[in-house]
Image: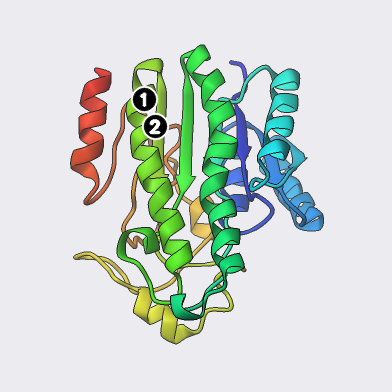
Amino acid sequence: MEKKIALVTGASRGIGRAVAVALAATGCHVLINYRSGQKEAEETLAQVERAGGKGVLCPFDVSDAAACESAIAEILKKHQRIDILVNNAGIRRDALLVFMKREQWAEVMATNLDSFYNVTQPVVKQMAMNRWGRIVTVASTAGQTGLEGQANYAAAKAGVIGASKSLAREVAKRGVTVNVLAPGFIETEMTASLPREQDSRRAIRPAGGSRRRGRVSLLGGRRLHHRCGVEHQRRRLHLTWPPANRIQVIGQEQDNCAAASAASGSS
């Protein structure tokens, strides 16, 4: 069986690294995207290879539309296709809105929201032509509940959730599934600077949920199930790969995406 080609953005550390290694373990050829952390990206590649997989470094800035267009065109020229896309790259520039500078707002929007268009648009076009593709975007419960000091981050994550729902409806009939993973608080370098007090405030949980921080290592340490969707503050995240040829979402988004699944004619 021909190996699937998977592009993971922001794969030099944290959730992105765990996803890249997990995909490699399933036999995918992993394209490891990063912006500036080459040393960290090389460590991701080493872990991919230790997992028995193969990969290559793909440095480009997801907030730069021209850089994305050029890099993805080069990938498609070399590999002919991208089967799996994981939109994971993201940054934080926290401040209360009354004190937030325009640059803080713009930087987060460019990396966390504009990047969805910059990367997904050229990738989904060829997926639709090939009549197969899997797109998963890493959002956050902040995009569903909001969080003080993160109006920019929450707005961007809410934006990618909405964009993903719309795109799912557009491409379901072409064999392309689009899903969102919205984890709660996961211990990574990006969240390390947040105080424990803020950790407890963000732990808005559903019935049966946990207020404990999740660990990114859990992403790659469990059996991969054929399900994917919006996860609400679940400490053990299920990276479901590849999603079945239908849209399955856990939690409050179920009705909307179930409609998209019905529209696709999938079982």
Q: Residue at x 34, y 38 (%)?
A: 165
Q: Nearer the viewer, residue 24 or 158?
A: 158
In the rendered image, the quadrant that contains the C terminus is top left
Residue for point 75% across, 26% down: 74
Looking at the rendered structure, the kind of residue marked 1 is Glu
> Quick one: quadrant of the N terminus?
top right
The residue depicted at 57 percent of the width and 73 percent of the height is 101
Dot label at residue 55: none
10 Å crowding of disc 2: few (<14), some (14-19), many (20+): many
Q: Are marks 2 and 1 in contact (CB under 8 Å)?
A: yes
Q: Position of residue 92 (x, y in %)?
A: 56, 66
Q: Residue under circle 1?
A: 170
Q: Is residue 266 visible?
A: no
Quarter of the image where one finds residue 143: bottom left
Amino acid on which disc 2 is placed: Leu
Front one among 220 and 189: 189
* Residue position marked by numbered label 2 in the rendering: 167
On screen, 75 above or below 206?
Answer: above
Q: CA distance from mark 2 to mark 1?
A: 5 Å
Q: Secondary structure at mark 2?
A: helix
Q: Position of residue 110 (x, y in %)?
A: 58, 52
Left or right: where does residue 175 sit relative to residue 77? left
* Residue 6 image position (x, y, % from top left): 60, 32
Q: Is residue 120 left or right of residue 151?
A: right
The residue nearer to you, when weighing 69 against 236, is 69
Q: Is residue 267 above or below residue 166?
A: above
Image spot of residue 85 (x, y percent): 55, 35
Residue at left offset 35%, top offset 67%: 146
Secondary structure beneath label 1:
helix
| Residues packed near mark 1 inside 10 Å, few (<14), some (14 to 19) or many (20 plus) | some
165 horizontally vs 193: left or right = left
Q: Is residue 16 above or below residue 23?
A: below
